[in-house]
Image (cartoon, rainbow, N blue to C red):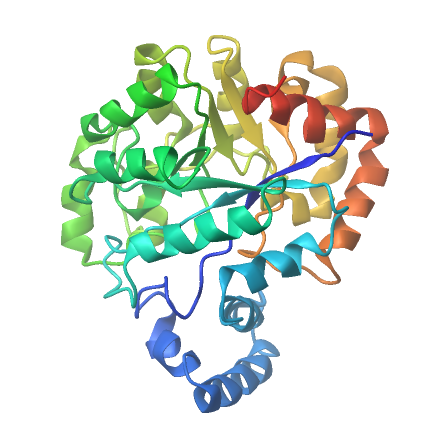
Amino acid sequence: MAAFYNTHIHTFRGDKDVPENYLPIGLVKLLSTKVGFFIVANLMSWLNSFSKNGMFERYRLFAALGKLGSQQAIFEKCYNEYPKDTKFIVLTMDMAYMGAGAVPRKYEDQLIELSNLQKIYPDNVLPFIHIDCRRDNCFDLFKTAIEQWNFKGLKLYPTLGTFPFDKRYYPIYEYCQTHNLPVVAHCSDGNPVFYKGKKNDLLQLLQGSTIPLVLGKKDNKALCAYFTHPLNYQQVMDDFPNLKICLAHYGKGNDAPNDVGGMNWDQTIKEMMKTYPNLYVDCAYSLYNQNWWSSIKVQLSTDPLLRDHFMFGSDFYMLEVDGTEKQCDIDFRAFIGEELFQQIAVTNPKKFMNVS
């Protein structure tokens, strides 16, 4: 089998690239010191026994991985779980505008560090730059990343407070379309990273929504789903028909309608694929829900259009699982079979990345 792709991982540093209020009750600052990490990590392990959804254990694991000291150390935790010729799309995160306080280091430093990692692993690391259109000179930064730092594509994370059809993104889309650069876009109604500023500020940011707003008693996390609704990409794909976009995190193991837009997002995306041939999805994050594996195997086996546009991705290290990344990959691969795995982990990613 040819080298396969994991199309969705992260290596940003929890001690340098995460704003001070990203985790609750000041945990980011406490976890940045050795003593604080030891105390808080043990406290979270104890608190997790009282948590129904394992929230505190996820915080602890997230902090432990993000505090390894370098993106190389974080990457190698994932890389060592896979065959040595595996290729990884590594997605950066610009969290400066999510209303969660200051980020310890400049975003450019995260990008340069990842660029240097790509030089160490030139056949394995495919860096994508996350752009938030609220950053001054974001187009110039994007061009620098592509032309000088060897980045391979664009990452969007709308739940931080922007819509993908914001015209400030359009010069970047035009550049991507012209230069055959793909886009990976966060597309999930359950968002671990979202705008955490004042609710009134969030409501102001949401005023451009093309999906009718139903506010009710929704908190910030729920409201931010309006930013990332799959229908928000229709205008982008109409305006840039040759732009390849992957809507990440397909599959929730749930066929119920979502209360944002009143429709099932997965079904919506599959309908959109009939109109937009350059629309892809990945299974990042969703991969770890083993109750969903039967559903996606049936979908891939019976829906040729989805099968040709579905890609394997894990979302390391945003979600840790029981056991190892390697075991989850092997179990999933064995479950769906080699033919389907070849399609989603080799054939489709090569087409997405414009690799012959």
From the viewer's perspective, is 137 left or right of 307?
left
Task: Choose top left, top right, bottom left or bottom right for residue 233.
Answer: top left
Is residue 86 at least partly visible in the picture?
yes
Give x and y (percent) for residue 184: 46, 33
**In which image quadrant can residue 253 be found?**
top right
| Residue 185 image position (x, y, % from top left) | 43, 34
Q: Quadrant for residue 46, please give it.
A: bottom right
The C terminus lies in quadrant: top right
Residues 178 and 120: in front is 120
Of the pair 289 and 141, the residue shown nearer to us: 141
Task: State the residue at coordinates (31%, 40%).
Answer: 131
Q: How many marks?
A: 0
Quadrant showing the N terminus: top right
- Which residue is found at the position 38% from the left and 56% from the top? 110
Taking depth in this image into account, of 108 and 298 the one nearest to the observer is: 108
Up the image or down, 221 lies above or below 340; here it is below
Most foreground residue, 75 or 305: 75
Residue 329 percent across, percent down from the top left: 75, 46
Specify whether residue 193 is in view: no
Q: Residue at x 74, y 49 (%)?
A: 82
Left or right side of 308 for 163: left
Vertical arrangement, residue 137 with respect to residue 304, above or below: below
Q: Residue at x 56, y 34 (%)?
A: 250
Residue 299 percent across, percent down from the top left: 70, 23
